[in-house]
Amino acid sequence: AKEPARVLVTGAAGQIGYALVPMIARGVMLGPDQPVILHMLDIPPAAEALNGVKMELVDAAFPLLKGVVATTDVVEACTGVNIAVMVGGFPRKEGMERKDVMSKNVSIYKSQASALEKHAAANCKVLVVANPANTNALILKEFAPSIPEKNITCLTRLDHNRALGQISERLNVQVSDVKNVIIWGNHSSTQYPDVNHATVKTPAGEKPVRELVKDDAWLNAEFITTVQQRGAAIIKARKLSSALSAASSACDHIHDWVLGTPEGTWVSMGVYSDGSYNVPAGLIYSFPVTCQNGEWKIVQAFMDDYNCFMASFCDSGLSIDEFSRKKLDLTADELSEEKALAYSCLT
Ligand code: NAI
């Protein structure tokens, strides 16, 4: 039998936490043959609620769940963890300045970075969900210098899945037959959901989404804004955030990172930019990635003749047209600004 994996969920008494921990305990994140020990962290005002979640995990009698640590002590929470899903954070409240929210989150992510660096298992993989997700991940990276930068990521898989869902609804096809959309950039309303390389499996073979949708006006406008604004639309409808889909997508993110992406398929992950696609190095930016042996790699080239020809016009990688280029740059600019704001909170 496999050794249990220790999975940390911060903010575990919150909404996403409540949806996420049972998924992890059922094997949705790490597979049906991987036992888990859950580490749940929250802050003292939520301690009682956190204990209630622990009681329910016991009551659910999950066969894969080999232990539960529920604590408000960050060191106890981080000790020995193999996977860390960072959902806890300080939400923006009415009347608060952006800088004040950033400042609260910078101090949270700075201290949790140090705890992870000192106490997590070697090679711990980190996924930041709490907003501003990309910049929280960047702060975590800066203050955990001994954790390899490739181990620190943020969640844009929800946006990726939302894009797949929109295409599936529009074309009335199974969502599992749609693949290779891309979310570029920030997990915010400046993100760029890109369908230029996406395909659908049809009885006549794989077809480009653009060819099947036959409506560039929709793809270039409404599709993009629907995906960008979907979080707000869910809050408006539910009066609560999109906890179910965020939790499910967080499982997808870790699942594919650890167990690999299928041949010919990529997913979107917020990762530390190495300058690919002329995105400034040193930002956490969402790229198309493939995963193998527990490591992600930014998709660089699409190997069919037509796309290689197109790619020759834009140094390397998937072809990026002028429309897309502007959107990649816009969301990068926002992330550079957020980074500057975050750094200004450190002094
Ligand atoms: P929530 O408010 O229900 O839960 C957040 C939890 O974090 C609370 O229990 C709170 O006590 C806890 N917390 C606060 N400070 C903490 C700290 N220093 N250490 C540990 N725990 C702490 O919020 P919800 O709906 O669960 O969302 C969580 C975060 O995820 C929010 O920042 C939200 O904006 C973000 N989010 C991100 C998405 C993505 O795709 N990246 C999608 C949806 C939400």
Image (tube, rainbow, N blue to C red):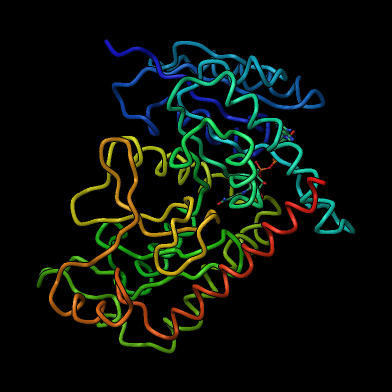
Which quadrant would residue 215 be assigned to in this image?
A: bottom left
Name above or below for residue 97 compared with residue 166: above
Name above or below for residue 266 compared with residue 64: below
Percent x, y for residue 220? 45, 83
Ligand 1 falls in which quarter? top right
Q: Pick the residue in front: 274 or 139.
A: 274
Q: Pick the residue in front: 290 or 61.
A: 290
Name above or below for residue 170 compared with residue 335: below
Total marks placed: 0
Percent x, y for residue 308? 19, 75
Residue at horizontal 37 percent and vertical 59 percent from the top: 288
Residue at horizontal 39 percent and vertical 43 percent from the top: 252
Percent x, y for residue 75? 66, 17
Q: Pick the residue in front: 239 or 123.
A: 123
Residue at horizontal 73 percent and vertical 24 percent from the top: 49
Which quadrant would residue 205 be assigned to in this image?
A: bottom left
Which quadrant would residue 257 be assigned to in this image?
A: top left
